[in-house]
Amino acid sequence: MNYRHSYHAGSFTDVVKHVILTALITSISRKDTPYCYIDTHAGTGYYDLFSEFAKKTKEYEGGIEKVIRHENPPPLIRRYLDCVHKINNELTGSRFASLRYYPGSPMIARYLARPHDRIIACELQPQEYQALKSAFAGDKQVAIHHTDGFLGLKAFLPPRERRGLVLIDPPYENPDEFSRIAHSLPVALKRWETGIYAIWYPIKEQAQVKRFYNTLKENIHHPVFAIELTTYPDLPNHLNGCGIVVINPPWQFDESVTEILPWLWKALTINDQGSYHAYMLK
Ligand SMILES: C[S@@+](CC[C@H](N)C(=O)[O-])C[C@H]1O[C@@H](n2cnc3c(N)ncnc32)[C@H](O)[C@@H]1O
């Protein structure tokens, strides 16, 4: 495991993932009953954009920095940006802090959670796990586990709330990651049929994405909604964009996504390259 998310924190693909995460949590929070959020590949909780890792790639310049500067964000994007401001305010102790820290998926979920909601986060890499544990030390709403996220899926499903969301966000270091996901989902769905599952994936070549969709269509008998955003044309062997498939999308989730995608793409695109799509796969 060589992957360190600190190199990519706040990148355009992080922004897309975290905006969609905000939209999903906002949708499931419409009902008062508690939900459980499960993060199978949680990372460290938050990232310092002044660190050696982040400074080396400066990926945040093409992501969060652009979105913060772009005018007239829609309400859901403002909700996501509030999380970014919150981590900066908390860690610097100033209400007017400028961008230095970036919240990861479990931190965003924590900021959006209500007092009766619960968060379970899994992380396998030992140092990242330690950092994640300290980020949430003493927080009774968050349980951190040093475990393989796919094993976590088996161990923690179904949650006692019987309502909620799983985020699956692996590093895609191994070529078989797409297939591991597609094959672990039917098992997870068997344990928790009504859960919402959001799976992030890189868009490097269209053929790989097509194969992933086809495997999902063959193996899953639930509604699947796909969201794609690219900032480059179809360049070979290049991270042109990313996508998120949502299994069992919440009611009217498609409408919220359709409202924010044009703004998000405009904020992130490089010279109007790439595009965005959101549609039911099945
Ligand atoms: C893309 S990063 C996660 C970023 C995080 N979800 C966020 O949005 O802020 C993937 C994380 O998965 C961890 N990881 C790698 N293999 C894993 C596994 N089998 N189970 C759990 N975590 C794993 C990596 O150490 C890394 O921190």
Image (cartoon, rainbow, N blue to C red):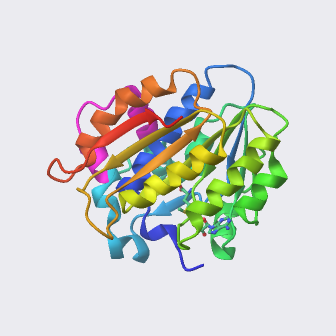
Provide the major secondary structure of the magenta segment. Answer: helix
The answer to whether 88 appears left or right of 183 in the picture is left
Residue 158: image quadrant is: top right
* Residue 135: quadrant of the picture: bottom right
Give residue 82's position: percent from left, percent from top: 44, 38
- Left or right of residue 81, residue 133 in this image: right
Magenta range: 65-82
At 31% from the left and 32% from the top, the residue drawn is 73
Res 55 → quadrant? bottom left
Residue 142 visible somewhere in the drawing: no
In this view, 238 is above or below 195: below
Q: Quadrant of ligand 1?
A: bottom right
Residue 80 is covered by the magenta coloring: yes
Q: Nearer the viewer, residue 96 or 137?
A: 137
Q: How many marks?
A: 0
In the visual, does 219 lie left or right of 162? left
**Residue drawn at point x = 70 percent, y = 60 percent:** 149
Q: Which residue is painted at 26% across and 44% down in the image?
A: 275
Q: Position of residue 91 (x, y in %)?
A: 51, 55
Where residue 80 appears, x then y in whole percent?
A: 45, 39
Q: Position of residue 54 (x, y in %)?
A: 39, 70
Instruction: Check residue 203 for magenta coloring.
Output: no
**Foreground residue, 154 or 30?**
154
Q: Is residue 5 above or below residue 76?
A: below
> In the picture shown, does residue 165 fall above or below 144?
above
Comparing 160 with 204, the one in front is 204
Residue lying at 58% horizontally and 48% vertically, measured from the top left = 216
